[in-house]
Image (spheres, helix red, strand yellow):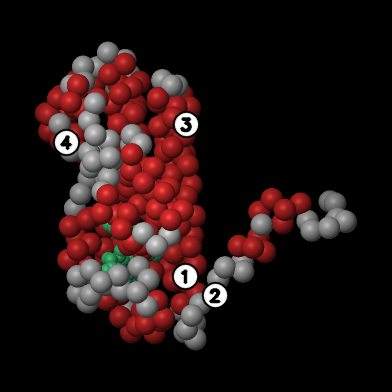
Amino acid sequence: MKVDFPGTTPYEEYVRASVLSRLQEPLSDDPGEMSFLVTTQVMELWFTVLVHEWETAARALRADDLPVAMAALRRSVYELESLNSSWKPLAHLTPTQFNAYRSALGEASGFQSATYRRLEFLLGEKSPAMLVPYRGAPETFAELEKALREPSLYDEVLRHLARRGHGMPAAVLDRDVSERYAADPAVEEVWQRVYAGDQNSEACRLGEALTEIAELVWRWRNDHLVATRRAMGAKVGTGGSPGVAWLEKRAAQHVFPELWTARSRV
Ligand code: HEM
């Protein structure tokens, strides 16, 4: 084993571990805050990886390169599973435990996570209103605005399927991609036909990879909702929302909607 290095170790140069481990600075004296902060940072890192995977998949689909797209989507399924397991340290907080550092967060809320918003935009959940928190941070605002105007991963999926001969309505293909994707009966019919046919077809395997992603996103939102309910009941959130009642509505939504509704008709 090599142990002599002229400068910092190659591990440090690659991983930047000393930079990473300088970012854990709890604001209270409570010993439980470290776990809250690091869990949030770990989730932010996974959000970044997921954005990378879904942008890779969207680009590959634009080029009709299905193997590259599928590889990225499959990786993202495992990454989502890791992300969701990260709830463990926060899933059983009591209100008293959470209160011990809650005031240190001030008005900070995951609602202000720009990377989470990019992730939602990629899933088709576009909303110009979500840019408002970044008006004072021009670089982040510009990045998110760009993401708002780009086709989502799901837009690229539907365009790809159209090029592969699955009849897609022009209204879906030419839609204003900066708007939230709204379910379309003709897209539901496409998925219905795909699911009624060869279970090994490329379209069916693509549909299943997307369904897996949609399910795991739904699980993340629901795990977040339950953790929040346990930690703070029905109190107002640090970001100023009504808290659990607001999160409940968000968690009820399914991304890639027709992949779910088509199932009732197969
Ligand atoms: C027990 C710990 C947590 C509690 C009590 C909690 C509470 C809340 C509440 C009440 C909201 C609604 C907005 C607000 O009023 O603040 C929210 C939103 C959000 N939180 Fe958390 N949260 C927790 C942990 C986390 C963690 C670890 C993350 C990871 C980054 C996170 C990410 C988010 C995101 C992305 C939103 C926006 C959701 C959306 O727009 O649909 N939260 N959280």
Asked if residue 79 shows in the view, the reply is: no
Marked residue nearer the N-terminal end (2 or 3):
2
- Pointer 4 residue: 183
Task: Identify the element where label 4 is drawn.
Answer: loop
* Nearest to the observer: residue 239 or residue 141: 141
Taking the spot 24% from the left edge, 34% from the top edge, the residue there is 176
Measure how far apart labels 1 and 2 are at the Cα level.
Answer: 8 Å
Tell me the kind of residue under disc 3: Ala
Taking the spot 67% from the left edge, 64% from the top edge, the residue there is 18
Tell me the kind of residue under disc 2: Glu
Report the image quarter containing ligand 1.
Answer: bottom left
- Pointer 3 residue: 71
Tell me the kind of residue under disc 4: Ala
Picture quarter containing residue 134?
bottom left
> Are there few (<14), some (14-19), or many (20+) residues within 10 Å of tag 2?
few
Asked if residue 107 shows in the view, the reply is: yes
- Pointer 1 residue: 37
Task: Identify the element where label 3 is drawn.
Answer: helix
Measure how far apart labels 2 and 4 are at the Cα level.
Answer: 43 Å
Say whether marks 1 and 2 touch (CB < 8 Å): yes
As drawn, is 206 to the left or to the right of 3? left
Say whether marks 1 and 3 touch (CB < 8 Å): no
Marked residue nearer the N-terminal end (1 or 2):
2
* Nearest to the observer: residue 204 or residue 109: 109
Measure how far apart labels 3 and 4 are at the Cα level.
Answer: 26 Å
As drawn, is 246 to the left or to the right of 156? left
Marked residue nearer the N-terminal end (4 or 1):
1
Marked residue nearer the N-terminal end (2 or 4):
2
Report the disc number at residue 25.
2
